[in-house]
Amino acid sequence: MPVRSVVVFCGSRPGRDPRWMQAAADLGRGLAEARIRLVYGGGKIGLMGAVADAALAHGGEVLGVIPEFLTTIEVAHGGLTALVVTGSMHARKQRMFDESDAFVTLPGGLGTLDETVEVITWAQLGLHRHPVLICNVAGWADGLLAAFGRTVMDGFSAESTRGLYEVVPDVAGVIGRLTALSVQPRVGGARL
């Protein structure tokens, strides 16, 4: 089956490089045009808001998932197809995982890094086989990728770890990969 629903991890701030906000808007539009549902953190600001607004503006379906305590900090988006408010960050991550066929990382801060590393770790543990695409817009992910490589070089991660994610240089590449991928069945329906 084709990819129908993608979780996007990205910043609740715009960042300093305008190419990052443009990438978020381009991804939202691209997902809508490919008829792939966007699942994201539910915020209205930063890259999060840009990806959601663009998907909605182009007729896309958007599910936001936000914990109650972040509804004011990340300014919960009131115009989504659906917004789920959870009781905790853990419940948010579980719900987003349950709704996913694939994961895409755009530029962001510590929360984005946390979510990305966590889904890669879950793949390493055999909890899912969903594709994880890191969109390295303007070299944003270079430091993260270097840290991943260092864990392999230092013997803390197996060389096979590099196969748990794919680095894509731009949004066009992400959309191309998502439309070419097939959904893999969930492994044992594990709760995370």
Image (cartoon, rainbow, N blue to C red):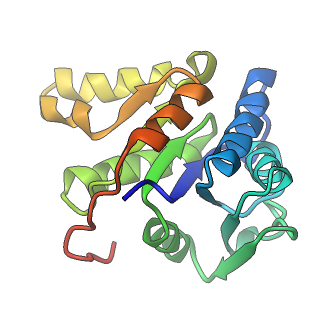
Closer to us: 114 or 95: 95
Q: Quadrant of residue 26?
A: top right
Q: Is residue 17 visible?
A: no
Going by the picture, which residue comes out furthest to the bottom? 87
Q: Quadrant of the C terminus?
A: bottom left
Q: Is residue 117 above or below residue 173?
A: below
Vertical placement of 49 versus 83: above or below? Answer: above
Q: Nearer the viewer, residue 32 or 94?
A: 32
Q: Nearer the viewer, residue 63 or 88?
A: 63
Q: Is residue 187 above or below residue 162?
A: below
16 vs 142, left or right, is right
Q: Where residue 105 appears, x then y in whole percent?
A: 53, 41
Going 50% across and 33% down the picture, which residue do you hit?
176
Q: Position of residue 135 (x, y in %)?
A: 53, 30
Locate residue 187 relative to residue 101 in the image: left or right: left
Please name the residue shown 40% across and 25% down the image: 145
Residue 192 can be seen in this image = yes
Is the N terminus in the top left, top right, bottom left or bottom right quadrant?
A: bottom left
Q: Position of residue 191 (x, y in %)?
A: 32, 77
Picture residue at 69% right of the left edge, 50% below the top: 32
Task: Name the residue rendered at 73%, 49% in the picture.
Answer: 48
User: Residue 154 occupies which quadrant of the picture?
Assistant: top left
Q: Residue 50: x, y in percent?
A: 80, 45
Is 3 left or right of 7, judged from the image as shown?
left
Q: Residue 98: which quarter of the image?
A: bottom left
